[in-house]
Image (cartoon, rainbow, N blue to C red):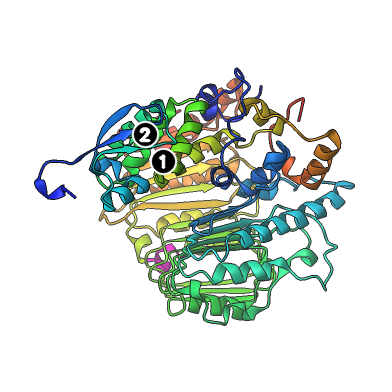
């Protein structure tokens, strides 16, 4: 027998009915079976109908008093991603099936007025044959979701590689005064198209919104988000929206983190007055550079930061790591700097910046830590620049990339020592790991 | 009700195999069924619980006492429930979920349902059938038809020979 999760081993050993052969579970009354089934994912729940005729008519049913609804796990989103050729037809069937299961699940909730969390993840698919005259199920799902008065968390993730199979919705969906706007704190929309006006309406209506994530939206072009529009927003993530031409983020006094992935490089970015920003996550060179080089202008907090963690990879020659140095210069109170060099895959994130602490009056970094080093010329050059600037340095820690084989590790260590040792004063604690 | 006397009121519960159990009223009223009886004033003598056997009732009372001793802290209650259920075999869990249903104890019912569902997560049909001793009463044609209808759901579960 195969056992999936190690953590389940104990339970499995205890709950073992192999000996006596009595089918106790099927004898449980209907409402108990439903109570058990409703805790599975929708796909798993449907699967139980194959067990025996006793189970056929149960799935999927959720109680009208449920507070949480999750249709398909988020990892199921991706499971069709590697399909090819003949599987395409199957793909389409899968998506239609999933959509109808979600519809039936919503039916069984009988309104689901108590719902606080709604997560609908439609698996990844590659169909492009969904004809125009068919109704997009997404409209009903959005209507359902936004009609709930207590809902705090909404995830609607729909996926397709083909733009033609997107689920476009008219921008007016957010125009009405929908009950969910009062309570909604976290919203994540993926593959749901709405335009600039739609975003404006969404933000101005969602008065409690703290976390917004938008992905795979092709209709956004000029994104403008300001403190007037979304005063409570703390976390903003925008990724894979290839039509965005300009993006302005202004006067967001509560914004703490931003994430921009897979962004068009020609996008004009304006970021002003985000005093609380402490976390940036992006794989877009232009955005990373823009924010890093103007760090202390953008955020008051950055001017007082004393501990910075950076992740980057210096893969392409075009990357001007001088910008990183400028950023470090722009943090006058820095005491501890950690740079982690990540694997040199194109798809790796370029920068990941985490500002850990604030407020100090010291002038120069006392500790510099460089990890994941492969001692490529770019890495060494950046390292030397950073260390050269750290005139008050007390400790330098260098961690060599674990991917290296033993002999090349030895070479890398030797190279690191050769490059850095001459620059360091005797009092500096130099550690190579 | 005698709650005003100052001493904790004790109820006597009788299982369907005639075992008697004493339990503090404050703990017993976790069961909505028992609470209703208490409120209706029918809890004076012995409360017969016709659908619960002595072994299961003993377990349920242990749970009632344990959980009612924990102040309003959902985290601690959850960890007590996890610990309480961790050493129970499926037989016991099935009896307990039936008892919880009969006694109308939603917190126990939820916890046991979740525990049973946890065993089924990501498992193949064949695996679940064997584990719970479920007899496959489909004809091969019927089973093929049901599987065909829902074949997409079988991706991502563990496969085995008789799936």
Question: Could you tell me which residue is drawn at 66 percent across and 22 percent down?
Answer: A1
Residue underneath mark 2? B60
Q: Is residue A147 above or below residue A25?
A: below
- Residue A340 in sight from this viewpoint: yes
- Identify the image quadrant of residue A145: bottom right
On the rendered structure, is B22 left or right of A148?
left
Q: Main secondary structure of the magenta part?
A: helix
Which of A316 and B111 lies nearest the eye of the viewer?
Answer: B111
Question: Could you tell me which residue is drawn at 76 percent across and 71 percent down?
Answer: A135
Chain of residue at mark 1: B
Is the residue marked by circle 1 packed among few (<14), some (14-19), or many (20+) residues within 10 Å? many
Pinpoint residue B89: horizontal percent, then vertical percent. 49, 25
Which of B146 and A120 lies nearest the eye of the viewer?
Answer: B146
Point out the stretch of residues depicted in magenta.
A294-299
**Which labelled disc corresponds to residue B108?**
1
Label 1 secondary element: helix
Is the residue marked by circle 2 packed among few (<14), some (14-19), or many (20+) residues within 10 Å? many
Q: Is residue A396 above or below residue A127?
A: above
Which of A14 and B135 lies nearest the eye of the viewer?
Answer: B135
Question: Could you tell me which residue is drawn at 66 percent across and 65 percent down?
Answer: A241
């Amino acid at each position: 027998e195969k056992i999936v999760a190690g953590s389940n081993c104990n339970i499995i050993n205890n709950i073992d009915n192999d000996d006596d052969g009595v089918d106790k579970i099927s004898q449980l009354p209907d409402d108990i079976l439903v109570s058990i089934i409703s805790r599975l994912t929708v796909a798993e729940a449907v699967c139980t109908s194959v067990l025996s005729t006793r189970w056929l008519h149960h799935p999927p049913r959720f109680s009208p008093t449920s507070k949480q609804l999750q249709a398909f796990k988020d990892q199921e989103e991706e499971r069709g991603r590697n399909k090819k050729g003949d599987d395409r037809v199957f793909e389409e069937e899968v998506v239609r099936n999933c959509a109808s299961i979600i519809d039936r699940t919503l039916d069984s909730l009988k309104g689901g007025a108590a719902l606080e969390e709604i997560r609908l993840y439609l698996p990844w698919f590659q169909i492009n044959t969904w004809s125009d005259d068919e109704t997009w199920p997404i409209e009903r799902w959005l209507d359902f979701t936004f009609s709930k008065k207590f809902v705090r968390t909404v995830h609607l993730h729909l996926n397709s590689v083909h733009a033609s199979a997107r689920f476009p919705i008219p921008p007016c969906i957010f125009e009405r005064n929908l009950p969910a706007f009062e309570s909604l704190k976290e919203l994540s929309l993926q593959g749901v198209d709405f335009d600039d006006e739609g975003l404006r309406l969404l933000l101005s209506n969602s008065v409690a919104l703290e976390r917004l994530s938008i992905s795979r939206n092709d209709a956004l072009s000029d994104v403008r988000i300001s403190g007037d529009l979304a005063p409570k927003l703390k976390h903003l993530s925008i990724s894979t929206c290839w039509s965005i031409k300009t993006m302005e983020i202004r006067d967001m006094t509560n914004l703490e983190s931003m994430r921009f992935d897979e962004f068009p490089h020609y996008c004009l970015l304006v970021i002003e007055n985000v005093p609380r920003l402490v976390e940036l996550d992006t794989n877009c060179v232009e955005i990373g550079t823009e924010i890093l080089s103007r760090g202390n202008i953008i955020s008051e907090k950055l001017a007082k930061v004393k501990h910075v963690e950076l992740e980057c990879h210096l893969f392409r020659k075009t990357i001007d790591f001088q910008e990183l140095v400028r950023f470090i210069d722009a943090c006058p109170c820095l005491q501890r700097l950690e740079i982690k060099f990540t694997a040199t895959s194109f798809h790796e994130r370029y920068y990941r910046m985490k500002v850990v602490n604030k407020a100090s009056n010291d002038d120069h970094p006392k500790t510099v830590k460089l990890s994941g080093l492969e001692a490529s010329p770019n890495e060494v050059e950046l390292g030397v620049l950073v260390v050269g600037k750290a005139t008050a340095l007390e400790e330098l820690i260098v961690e060599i990339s674990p991917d290296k084989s033993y002999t090349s590790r030895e070479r890398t260590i030797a190279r690191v020592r050769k490059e850095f040792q001459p620059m360091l004063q005797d009092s500096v604690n130099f550690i190579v790991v | 009700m005698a709650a005003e006397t100052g001493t904790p009121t004790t109820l006597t519960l009788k299982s369907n195999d005639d075992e008697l159990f004493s339990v503090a009223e404050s703990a017993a009223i976790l069961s909505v069924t028992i609470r209703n009886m208490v409120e209706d004033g029918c809890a004076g003598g012995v409360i017969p619980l016709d659908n619960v056997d002595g072994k299961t009732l003993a377990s349920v009372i242990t749970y009632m006492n344990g959980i009612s001793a924990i102040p309003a802290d959902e985290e601690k209650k959850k960890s007590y429930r996890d610990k309480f259920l961790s050493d129970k075999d499926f037989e016991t869990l099935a009896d307990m979920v039936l008892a919880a249903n009969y006694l109308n104890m939603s917190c126990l019912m939820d916890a046991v349902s979740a525990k049973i569902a946890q065993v089924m997560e990501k498992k193949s049909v064949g695996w679940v059938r064997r584990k719970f001793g479920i007899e496959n009463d489909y004809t091969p044609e019927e089973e093929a038809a049901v599987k065909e209808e829902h074949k997409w759901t079988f991706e991502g579960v563990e496969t085995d020979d008789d799936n």
